[in-house]
Image (spheres, helix red, strand yellow):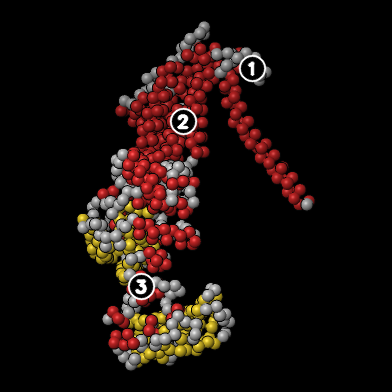
Amino acid sequence: MAEITLEKVVKRYGALGVVHGIDLTIAHEEFVVLVGPSGCGKSTTLRMIAGLEDITGGLVKIGGQVVNDLPPRKRNISMVFQNYALYPHMNVRDNLGFGLKIAGQSPAEIARRVTEAADILGLVPLLDRTPAELSGGQRQRVAMGRAIVRNPDAFLFDEPLSNLDAKLRGQMRAEIKKLHQKVRTTVVYVTHDQVEAMTLADRIVVMKDGNIEQVGTPMEVFNHPLTTFVATFIGSPPMNLLPGTIAGQIVRLADGTEVPVPDRLQRFVRDGMAVQLGIRPDDISPVGHGLSQDGPGAEVSLTVDLAEPLGMESLIYTRLAGQEVQAKLYGPRIVAPGEVLAFRLALDRAHLFDAASGKSVRAH
Amino acid sequence: MTVTVQSRASKQAKRIALWFTTFALMLVMCVPGLWVVLSAFRPNREILAKPPVWIPQELSLVNFGKVFGFGAEQVGIPVGSYFANSLIIALTSTIIALIIGIGGGYAFARYRFRFKGGLFLGLMLFRAVPGIALSLPVFMMWSKLGLVDTKLGLIIVYVSLNVPFTIWLIDGFFRQIPQALSEAAQVDGCTRWQAFWKIEFPLAKSGIAAAGVFAFLTSWNEFALASQLTRSTDSKTLPVGLLDFTAQFTIDWAGMCAMAVIIIIPALILTFIVQKHLIAGLTFGGVKG
Ligand SMILES: Nc1ncnc2c1ncn2[C@@H]1O[C@H](COP(=O)(O)OP(=O)(O)OP(=O)(O)O)[C@@H](O)[C@H]1O
Ligand SMILES: [Mg+2]
């Protein structure tokens, strides 16, 4: 059992606070992704779990045991680094076997487990090469092999795919997911790429400025973002946010456009409340070219400023309530700039955030 | 067409100029060395002949026999002791300078501590002071401490002369090794100490070897300070011993050249080793994407 628990974990460099007391429980065999913009403290948090960074305050527990004062080697974790950190003076076989050798395993046992790991990752033909003789994706796989060969309680990944090109990144993402299905182990995975977060995670932890913004399954985080930060960070292109005021059960946008408050949010709003209406590009589509045509909606006439055709869909830039918004057109129809189209807003999937706090009105 | 021909011609001219310059410089550097080596195998009268004899007429090992104290002619110079002194002093001071250099270089490359910048600058400035400028104060201190004309006295001087350099060079090599390697090793089960010896040290090996050879050569060839601080066979080194060939009115050039060759040979061998190591460099394929 390797449940990882963070309790009020704080990290400071001198006077500079980097992580401000985060609480998080990662279940046994769970795949948790820490995601957030650059500098928000993801790596620092991961490195505190690994034991590579002192913990200023709070507790880190692995399998119920407080590990604050244990060096990395006593935590039975393994880690995949952003730059792979393969040992350049050893061949792949020795890279994979290094941890076992340090642990004093017999040569026969080392050979057996190295072969086993190499098999899983398709590294058998590369065993006698040095890291310098490998491609980026192969290095990545060796780094993962080195992590699984020791059979640790948890894997820690720090942006393992960020050095790969887009195509390879997609492939390796799938391999990591398969690997986790084969080798059921607790995983903490750091990335700033929300696609990786959405596709890999059992649960996503969205971080911002050293705090946790929201924890939830990818669908929870996508469908019910608790803050405007999460709303715009998860999902691509990002959610449109339109300032407005509540008047009864109406949201009056900046230019006077009125849209009804979505049914499911009606009980959360007060008259006169300053809000931001959040609506994803996928939920603003020309009539007849949207994802869903039924359910509550509002129709508005908008002028296309710019259209980016992507084959079976187009991304449309337009203006709504005096603000640039992005919309999606589904289908192979070509639109020209300047064209005026009737757009449908799928209000059942819209969000309302308190303008002052940036928090979802549901959170009040 | 004409343009390319012209540019090819001018490239050729540049190449020739480059070769010529290189050749001229090599000539300036090599001819004295060659002269010394040749003279080591020639009798004094041929060395001093006027007009100079460029092409040696007779070559023999007589000079070496003379220097080492066998054969018909002998000079009363204890070359054996000098050689032993040189070897002991250079080796010991190099090993100590390397140990300090590895520790210091690693600390500068990996740790943050107070006055780090100042300390580093201080070490580098110390390098800028010519050793000979320190000879008088060192001599006075050493005579108080009874270190004049001892091997230990010279060893201490050479260690302090070499340490700034070894720290600087080794620091540079450790800096090139990403910290993530040691961290990966620690996650893999190593203590910090094991991570150092199994990962970082092997990767910095070429740099450490280069620093060692440079330190050895500095100590091996050093003359100015050694000539002040040594007196007798207890501590005199080979370069100082060369002066034994100058009597009041005569200089035994042949013997001196033979001894110079004896000094040069270990230096040459070591230079070849350092060259190999410097060219070998380091491969960081496992780290860079
Ligand atoms: N050794 C250090 N000394 C001082 N500040 C540091 C140190 N290491 C990291 N920081 C600061 O801590 C903050 C969090 O860093 P961290 O590396 O955890 O960010 P991150 O979320 O992993 O970002 P990225 O996506 O860019 O890797 C940053 O603002 C960084 O400047
Ligand atoms: Mg990071």
| Residue in the image at 70% along x and 39% along y | B16
Subunit bearing disc 2:
B
- Is there a contact, CB below 8 Å, between mark 2 and mark 1? no
Residue A176's disc is none
The answer to whether residue B106 is above or below residue A255 is: above
Q: Type of residue at label 1?
A: Pro
Q: Secondary structure at mark 2?
A: helix
Residue B217's disc is 2
Q: Are marks 2 and 1 on the same chain?
A: yes
Q: Position of residue B40 (x, y in %)?
A: 56, 18
Determine the CA span between mark 3 and mark 1.
92 Å
Q: Which residue is mark 1?
A: B56
Q: Earlier in the sequence, mark 2 or mark 1?
A: 1
Q: Type of residue at label 2?
A: Leu
Subunit bearing disc 1:
B
| Residue in the image at 49% along x and 41% along y | B281
Q: Which residue is mark 3?
A: A219
Q: Is mark 1 within 8 Å of ligand 1?
A: no
Q: Type of residue at label 3?
A: Met
Q: Position of residue A323 (x, y in %)?
A: 46, 83
Subunit bearing disc 3:
A
Mark 3 neighbour class, 10 Å CA radius: few under 14, some 14 to 19, many 20 or more: few
The answer to whether residue A211 is visible is: yes
Determine the CA span between mark 2 and mark 1.
30 Å
